[in-house]
Image (cartoon, rainbow, N blue to C red):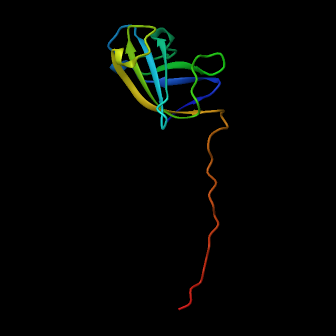
Amino acid sequence: MKQLTRNATSEFVCTLKEKQTLTTPYWLFRFVKDGTNEEVTFVYHDSEDTSTNKTRYNRFPITEGGFSPIILPSGIWTYYIYEQTENRNTDYTLSTTLCEIGQVKVISTTSDQSTFEPDYTYQYSETTQ
């Protein structure tokens, strides 16, 4: 599962080229929070892809929080990435092609990852026969 850190810039790696039909698309990122269905959308141009091998993978620097307009509360989100010709459209129903679906975990800080502490307390009782 991909991971983004709040109030920081994270590298978001995906594979969009295999389903891409436009020459130089704008990419509509749509995040839907599991449980609440809260939606956050934003657009990147193809030129903002920082990948060194764009035919194999794509990489976008996503800055969440702070002065960025992208606000993603902590939790599990399902993301959808669409290609489109318009740079301001945030309505996914007007996009050209859905190129990728996946899940991402948004954490508050790098130390916000949950740890599991097992309970090794056992109860023992004897029964008489």
For residue 87, above or below residue 127 = above
Q: Residue at x 48, y 13 (%)?
A: 44
Which image quadrant is residue 62 in?
top right
Q: Position of residue 3 (x, y in %)?
A: 55, 32
Q: Residue at x 45, y 23 (%)?
A: 30
Q: How many marks?
A: 0
72 to the left or right of 81? right
111 to the left or right of 101? right
Q: Position of residue 66 (x, y in %)?
A: 66, 19
For residue 96, above or below residue 113 = above
As rendered, which of 75 and 48 lies closer to the eye?
75
Q: Residue at x 35, y 14 (%)?
A: 94
As rendered, which of 54 and 12 lies closer to the eye?
12
Q: Position of residue 73 (x, y in %)?
A: 58, 30
23 to the left or right of 62? left
Q: Position of residue 25 (x, y in %)?
A: 40, 10
Q: Residue at x 35, y 22 (%)?
A: 98
Which image quadrant is residue 69 in?
top right
